[in-house]
């Protein structure tokens, strides 16, 4: 491809990990110098991190109107950058922001759009992407038929690969945005202090009905915090009011693909599997050896979680 | 308040999915089709907005004749009007759906359009934003709390690592996430009554495809599948495997 535009997102002092994933994915399709980053109100220090993944060119949209993020304005701004860069492909991460912004941008430029890609093939002419459908029960191969194309990539699937660091040349771009187009904007963001989200975690420890009650969740939390992971839950647990909605993994909860998923007292209903089956490794703990989760796991411990979890936590601690 | 709810017809989430011969569609044999679970939440939100503000709730689906069954469910839940944008077959992409829904929405001029956060068949996750662009309306996706006062809209949603509060104004597009509300179950008499209610039909307009399905495959499920007992030795073995074989801890 002649040019690929990748959407970068700042995070604290650097960029989000998903931005590095998107850069790495773009470099599978074209030479590094053909990949151009686009960011909104990022700092040169933050953008310098893109160099570690081999990106050397970034257009940094500057606009006071975008200090509170607005999807309608961001789409206008990115659209202007697209007009300048003229990419064949625009890549976003499939996180909350990307999933909302990418279809707006695609519609503006009349581009084919596919969300949640997990893989792609490009033969120099046609781009065919793979995307899970029916909550991952099948994979669809889709061909994008328009000249310019837009994709979102499922987080945690395209592993970010570091390169010999290059310096990043940042071009600030003042875009002329219209305050009247700011029809929707983020008025506040409350960070989950100290609490890692299942969507960002490398390791997730989830509890199911087998945990018996919210008072026992410390068993899950202890293991999760030891591993630097996040706490998840089955729908049974969320519906019982033991844990918040945001922790639900599954077809009507969050779709996760951590490196390690530990399912404790979860039977492995098809709707739960749908949300975690693309995890790299799965460890299940269940007292019923016939539980469906055991057909889907890499490692399984058949036993009572109330005795297994403390031992497992102890042994991992000892091993560190 | 003029409320439009868009709903899609999807396989029940408990369905086993098998690729049909031809390799491009799924085998529908034995599959029960239902209202997309997130769209039930959107319907419920529409009904609650009507209960609070007055007005009408119109429910629309794009699909073939069979999709009327989910409109009956919506009518039983209490929507005022049901509309099907009729297609000849199931062979269309998300953009086709968006153009057609936008086209219909223009005739209705709604104050709010409610959708589900995703349709659990193709999980396209794009309708709210695409409609937003086509209709030049603001949109907020994946909403877990919605407050409307006058024309001011405040929506909450979970994002990676936190919770965002988003401000907007009517007319606006909102997509529903679990947690927004608990959808009501239709009552038997209402289910009976819904059977004879009218369903308006609109013919779909042609829209050139932007995306083509070239094949479906089943996900590869190669898992190590090592099962052990809960003895101390076995648990130690698993820790060792996580460390040395999977290299994840
Ligand atoms: C439309 C729809 C959407 C849904 N979406 C989701 C979703 O997003 N996510 C989701 O998770 N579910 C979802 N479900 C629900 C799903 O079908 C299951 O009901 C749910 O996943 C079951 O949760 P569970 O495994 O925690 O409970 P159960 O199925 O009750 O399993 C509990 C397990 O714990 C084991 N156990 C009990 N005690 C112990 C012990 N002491 N030690 C070890 N093991 C023990 C049992 O052997 C059993 O296997 C959905 C259902 C529907 C209809
Ligand atoms: N065929 C359809 N008819 C009406 N509404 C639809 C249709 N497909 C999707 N939608 C709506 O768009 C939402 C998001 O779907 P999607 O972007 O396809 O994942 C769904 O939850 C529905 O509210």
Image (cartoon, helix red, strand yellow):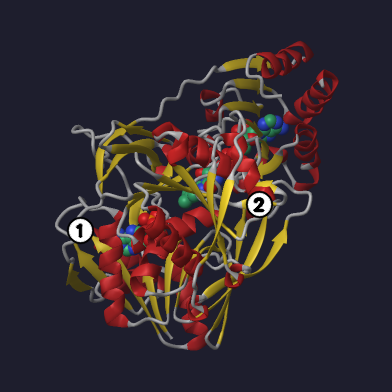
Determine crowd level at label 1: few under 14, some 14-19, many 20+ residues with C-alpha closer than 10 A.
some
- Residue beneath disc 1: B64
Determine crowd level at label 2: few under 14, some 14-19, many 20+ residues with C-alpha closer than 10 A.
some
- Residue A245 x, y percent position in the rendering: 63, 55
The chain to which mark 2 is attached is: A
Quadrant of the image containing the N terminus of chain A: top left
For residue A145, say whether it is visible.
yes
B61 versus B109 height, above or below = above
Quadrant of the image containing the C terminus of chain A: top right
Which residue does the image show at 25% across and 36% down from the upper left?
A: A125
Q: Quadrant of ligand 1?
A: top right
For residue B82, say whether it is visible.
no
- Residue B19 x, y percent position in the rendering: 28, 34
Which residue does the image show at 70% across and 23% down from the upper left?
A: A303
Secondary structure of the residue carrying tag 1 is: loop
| Residue B128 found in image quarter | bottom left
Nearer mark to the viewer, of 1 and 2: 2
B76 versus A124 height, above or below = below
- Residue A288 x, y percent position in the rendering: 62, 26
Q: Nearer the viewer, residue B220 or B161?
A: B161
A142 versus B108 height, above or below = above
- Residue beneath disc 2: A44
Which residue does the image show at 35% across and 65% down from the upper left?
A: B73
Give the Cα separation between the discs numbered 1 and 2: 52 Å
Which residue does the image show at 63% across and 26% down from the upper left?
A: A283
User: Are marks 1 and 2 in one subunit?
Assistant: no
The chain to which mark 1 is attached is: B
Is residue A122 found left or right of B205 in the rendered image?
right
| Residue A4 found in image quarter | top left
Q: What is the number of the mark on residue B229?
A: none
- Residue A174 x, y percent position in the rendering: 54, 66
């Amino acid at each position: 491809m002649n040019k690929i535009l990748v959407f970068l997102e700042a995070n604290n002092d650097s960029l989000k990990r998903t931005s590095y994933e998107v850069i790495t994915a773009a470099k599978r399709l074209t030479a590094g110098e053909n990949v151009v980053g686009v960011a909104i109100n990022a700092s040169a220090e933050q953008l310098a991190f893109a160099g570690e993944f081999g990106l050397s060119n970034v257009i940094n949209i500057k606009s006071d109107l975008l200090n509170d993020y607005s999807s309608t304005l961001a789409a206008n701004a990115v659209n202007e950058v697209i007009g300048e860069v003229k990419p064949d492909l625009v890549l976003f991460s499939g996180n909350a922001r990307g999933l909302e912004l990418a279809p707006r941008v695609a519609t503006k430029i009349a581009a084919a759009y596919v969300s949640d890609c997990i893989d792609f093939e490009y033969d120099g002419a046609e781009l065919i992407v793979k995307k899970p459908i029916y909550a991952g029960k099948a994979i669809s191969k889709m061909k994008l038929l328009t000249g310019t194309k837009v994709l979102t990539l499922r987080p945690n699937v395209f592993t970010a690969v570091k390169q010999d660091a290059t310096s990043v040349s940042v071009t600030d771009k003042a875009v002329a945005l219209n305050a009247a187009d700011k029809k929707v904007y983020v008025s506040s963001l409350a960070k989950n202090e100290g609490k890692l989200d299942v969507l960002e975690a490398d390791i997730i420890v989830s509890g199911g009905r087998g945990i018996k009650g919210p008072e026992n969740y410390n068993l899950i939390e202890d293991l999760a915090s030891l591993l630097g992971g996040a706490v998840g839950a089955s729908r049974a647990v969320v519906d019982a009011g033991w844990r918040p909605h945001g922790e639900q993994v599954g077809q009507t909860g969050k779709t996760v693909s951590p490196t390690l998923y530990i399912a404790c007292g979860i039977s492995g209903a098809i709707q739960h599997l749908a949300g975690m089956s693309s995890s790299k490794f799965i460890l299940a703990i269940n007292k019923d050896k016939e539980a469906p989760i055991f057909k889907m796991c890499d490692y399984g411990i058949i036993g009572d979680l109330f005795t297994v979890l403390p031992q497992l936590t102890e042994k991992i601690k000892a091993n560190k | 308040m003029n409320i439009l709810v868009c709903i899609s017809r999807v396989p029940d989430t408990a369905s086993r999915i098998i690729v049909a011969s031809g390799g491009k569609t799924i085998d529908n044999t034995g599959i029960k089709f239902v209202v997309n679970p997130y769209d039930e939440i959107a319907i419920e939100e529409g009904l609650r907005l009507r209960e609070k503000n007055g007005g009408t709730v119109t429910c629309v689906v794009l699909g073939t004749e069979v999709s009327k069954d989910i409109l009956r469910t919506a009518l039983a839940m209490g929507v005022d009007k049901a509309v099907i944008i009729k297609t000849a077959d199931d062979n269309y992409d998300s953009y086709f759906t968006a153009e057609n829904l936008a086209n219909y929405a223009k005739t209705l001029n709604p104050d709010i359009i409610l959708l589900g956060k995703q349709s659990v068949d193709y999980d396209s996750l794009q309708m709210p934003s695409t409609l937003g662009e086509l209709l030049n309306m603001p949109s907020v996706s994946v909403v877990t709390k919605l407050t409307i006062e006058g024309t001011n809209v405040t929506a909450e949603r979970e994002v990676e690592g936190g919770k965002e509060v988003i401000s907007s104004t009517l007319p606006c597009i909102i997509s529903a996430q679990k947690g927004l509300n608990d959808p009501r179950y239709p009552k038997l008499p209402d289910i009976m009554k819904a059977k004879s209610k009218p369903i308006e039909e609109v013919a779909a307009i042609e829209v050139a495809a932007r995306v083509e399905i070239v094949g479906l495959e089943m996900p590869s499920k190669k898992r190590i599948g090592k099962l052990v007992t809960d003895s101390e030795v076995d648990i130690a073995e698993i820790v060792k495997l996580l460390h040395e074989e999977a290299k994840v801890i």
